[in-house]
Image: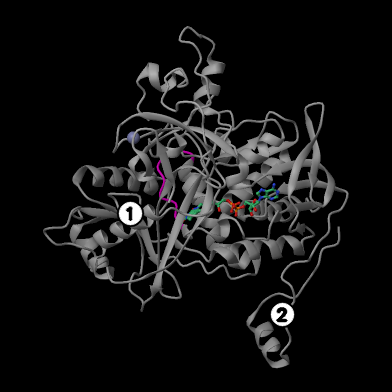
Amino acid sequence: MLRIPCPHCGLRDYTEFQYGGDASKIRPVHTEECLAPWHDHVFLFDNPKGVHREYWQHRLGCRQWLIIDRHTATNVIEPTTRDPTNSDLMNSDLMNTGRQP
Amino acid sequence: MKAMHRSRYSALSLVRHALKEMPWRRAWRAATPQPHYDVIIVGGGGHGLATAYYLAANHGIRRVAVLEKSYIGSGNVGRNTTLVRSNYQLPGNTQFFEHSLKLWESLSHTLNYNVMLSQRGQVVLAHGPAQLDVLARKGNTMLLNGIDAELLDRGEVMRLLPYLDYSSECRFPIYGGLLQRRAGTVRHDAVAWGYARAASDLGVDIIEHCEVTGFIENQGRITGVDTTQGRIHAGRTAIAVAGHSSHLAAMAGLRLPIESHLLQAFVTEAIKPFVDHVISFGAELFYISQSDKGGLVFGGHIDGFNSYTQRGQFPKAQDVAECAVALIPSISRLRLLRHWGGIQDMTPDGSPFIGRTPLRDLYFNGGWCYQGFKATPASGWCFAHTLAHEEEHPLIRHLALDRFERHNGFDEYGLGLWPYRQ
Ligand SMILES: Cc1cc2nc3c(=O)[nH]c(=O)nc-3n(C[C@H](O)[C@H](O)[C@H](O)COP(=O)(O)OP(=O)(O)OC[C@H]3O[C@@H](n4cnc5c(N)ncnc54)[C@H](O)[C@@H]3O)c2cc1C
Ligand SMILES: [Zn+2]
């Protein structure tokens, strides 16, 4: 079972969380009128066989959104020195648009 | 290239072998890579092998190599739950999947290999009037396309599948269903072996334990691949690696609208013949059938987060077991014998991609989500045509890799936009 370290609640089963997908993408600025960067942002994925930076929300716990770095071939979660809930690190995608994956 | 005319399988050859106590010969030649091919296909799954076979059989292109990093059938073609059907409703899908089902119906004869197609019929259940309306619309679309479909009311479902839960305390009461009698199951390993043998007989080199590690690029054109068995040149190169699509594309500098996700399958201990059809639950993504050995085979949703692990998470076992018992209470005491996982190539609209890529002479086939097994023959058929003519086959024009750029997403189930939520 994949277990995710929540900075508030400790190590919890992944079933308490909602997956939010790739967190490494940078959302184009709102005034961006060219469609190409929007297309790339919405539809293209690095999808690495390796370390994947991703969003999870602790829905059945503290309800915080987290960013974790997980290896997709081993499920090992990399230790992080940054605050996974620091909104500076949350690129604008989830935080500024209220998107609920 | 030399075509190998080996003996055909028949009742007579079976008797002859039994009498002489001879071991059966290898079904396909062990090949070592030549320096150059007309077409290289990366990935020896169902789609790669079918493509190789139809290149040779339909288009006379026989200088073809299939490069497989492991052994033939080690990927999703040997891990899926073997359902084949053609009950789709978007124009494009309907015709493509019906073409596939028609190819399945004659495949054992075409390949001289018994793929054990069992047209036992599939019932998709509806648990309310609105859901039955949707199924009626789908059934009408099928009928208009000359595909068999029968709408069933509750009484008809009860007669056909008397062992489902029809009690008053049932959580999702059964309201009706849509039956496609020509749908069913196919022996998945036999599909890989049958296509491999038939392609090999026509001169195709099937090279196992040969992993592609890079592409040779020359001014925007792909001219071959680097592999663990050395460099191999090709006129055209085709990718058909399912869950590893993004991984391969990245070697050519391409990013794809694909995420890799884990899908599990489950088998119970064997019981006497009981579930005679394929049944799809309407309240959840869950489907069940019975294998020839007697085990009940079922599956559900992907685990739901990017994964290349091929190893499942336990909560999904619980989910599917709950669905199974909600549908068929009498199997609650059966033990789960095995479960396994495969890495699925998931796309934002749930539909695959077949065709050209931005790089000349590089072709792509992937993003099959839950539906790649039933698509195998038509996918190979159309991909081979595309490679031979350097232009997409009419049946797959809606499956272009750049369809999102052209606002032509193709979402059969209306579930877009996130691959992990398909
Ligand atoms: C549990 C499960 C149940 C499913 N059930 C159904 C179903 O009931 N009906 C249905 O229609 N579909 C089903 N599917 C989907 C279907 O199995 C797949 O969409 C389909 O098999 C994928 O195409 P393939 O057979 O070519 O893939 P695969 O068999 O996975 O072939 C891809 C091959 O590429 C090889 N490869 C990868 N990287 C490299 C490299 N670098 N070099 C060389 N080779 C490489 C892999 O080793 C692999 O053998 C299911 C899938 C799973 C996992
Ligand atoms: Zn928490």
* Residue B24, disc: 2
Q: Residue furthest right?
A: B35
Label 2 and label 1 in one chain: yes
Residue B186 position in % (x across, y down) = 51, 64
In primary-sequence order, the first of circles 2 and 1 is 2
Amino acid at the residue labelled 1: Asp
Tell me the residue at 38%/53% (across/down): B316
Q: Is residue B341 magenta?
A: no
- What range of the chain is rendered magenta? B84-92
Does A72 appear above or below A63?
A: below
Q: Position of residue B54 (x, y in %)?
A: 68, 53
Mark 2 neighbour class, 10 Å CA radius: few under 14, some 14 to 19, many 20 or more: few
Q: Return the mark for residue B319.
A: 1
Is B87 included in the stretch rendered in magenta? yes
Q: Residue furthest left?
A: B168
- What chain letter is assigned to the residue under label 2? B
Q: Is residue A7 or residue B221 the one in the foreground? A: A7
- Secondary structure character of the magenta stretch overall: loop
Asked whether mark 2 lies closer than 8 Å to ligand 1, one says no
> Would residue B393 be seen by someone viewing this image from the given angle?
no
